[in-house]
Amino acid sequence: MSVYRIGQIVPSSNVTMETEIPALFRARETIAPERFTFHSSRMRMQEVTKAQLEAMDADSTRCAAELSDAHVDVLGYACLVAIMSMGSGYHCLSESKLGEVTSANGAKAPVVTSAGALISALNIMGAKKIALIAPYMLPLTRMVVDYIGEQGFEVGDYRALEIPNNLDVAAHDPRNLVGIAKGLDYEDADVVVLSACVQMPSLPSIEIVENELGKPVISAAVSTAHQLMRALDLPAIAPGGGSLLSGAYANA
């Protein structure tokens, strides 16, 4: 039986990524033989502001070095807006930079950013137009929308929930996303992003919203889990993870 170490670089105030990512991998364990352990390193961040996000991102190399000390098999950078607020295509630069840190430390490992994972998921699913929900204040949400647009996708409609404190984002009830999603103009969307944030919980509502809207529904966390599995060269599948982890894109 193979056991893989999953490393996560997380904001200090993030309490969701260490629950939703393991939940998806534990779901996979019910149908596949591989097993996983989870290891985190934290970057200081309390308020979701551009200044704090930039300062936090500068600390990501330290986290990558710490996790490579543990010889993790893959690293996930768990803050979508931190990457997207740094400018167009920054996820590629971040993944390369952090990968170089692991190599220099003698424990080379692939790096997945939640921002890059979301972009990859949309490409894999053949999306052209999307609708999304984000917890951020409106200026940061617009940065996210612009970033996704620069990657070739049209964001037809979006909602900014404007929750400034990161712990309050984590406390947002995922059941509320069902009604919020129904309020989106989603008819022409190829994919609905239920949470464009790895801190805002959404996993319990992914498949509920898929059934309600009749559309594929993903989140930053679900996208990250898919890419972490693929970075390990494993089929990306997990019960309860919606269309992306249904098996239809297992080897994409």
Image (cartoon, rainbow, N blue to C red):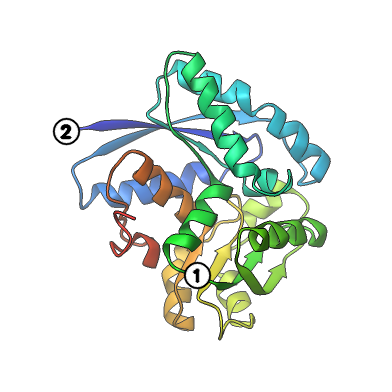
- Circles 1 and 2: CB atoms closer than 8 Å: no
Between residue 206 and residue 63, name the one nearer to us: 63
Residue 239, picture quadrant: bottom left
Q: Which kind of residue does numbered mark 1 sit on?
A: Ala
Between residue 48 and residue 98, name the one nearer to us: 98
Q: Which mark is residue 43?
A: none
Secondary element under disc 1, as helix, strand or loop, is loop
Q: Quick check: 246 left or right of 8?
A: left
Of badges 1 and 2, nearer the viewer stands: 1
Q: Which kind of residue does numbered mark 2 sit on?
A: Met
As drawn, 164 above or below 111? below
Does the image show residue 41? no
Q: Percent from the top left, x then y, of residue 15?
A: 58, 43
- State how many labels appear: 2
Q: Which mark is residue 1?
A: 2
Secondary element under disc 2, as helix, strand or loop, is loop
Residue count near mark 2 (Cα–Cα under 10 Å), binned few <14, some 14–19, many ≥20: few
Q: Percent from the top left, x then y, of residue 189?
A: 55, 78
Q: Residue at x 71, y 28 (%)?
A: 58
Q: The N terminus lies in which quarter of the figure?
A: top left
Q: Residue at x 56, y 84 (%)?
A: 188
Q: The C terminus lies in which quarter of the figure?
A: bottom left
Task: Give the mark nearest the N terminus, 1 or 2.
Answer: 2
Q: Which residue is mark 1?
A: 127
Q: Measure how far apart labels 1 and 2 are at the Cα level.
A: 36 Å
Q: Residue at x 62, y 48 (%)?
A: 80
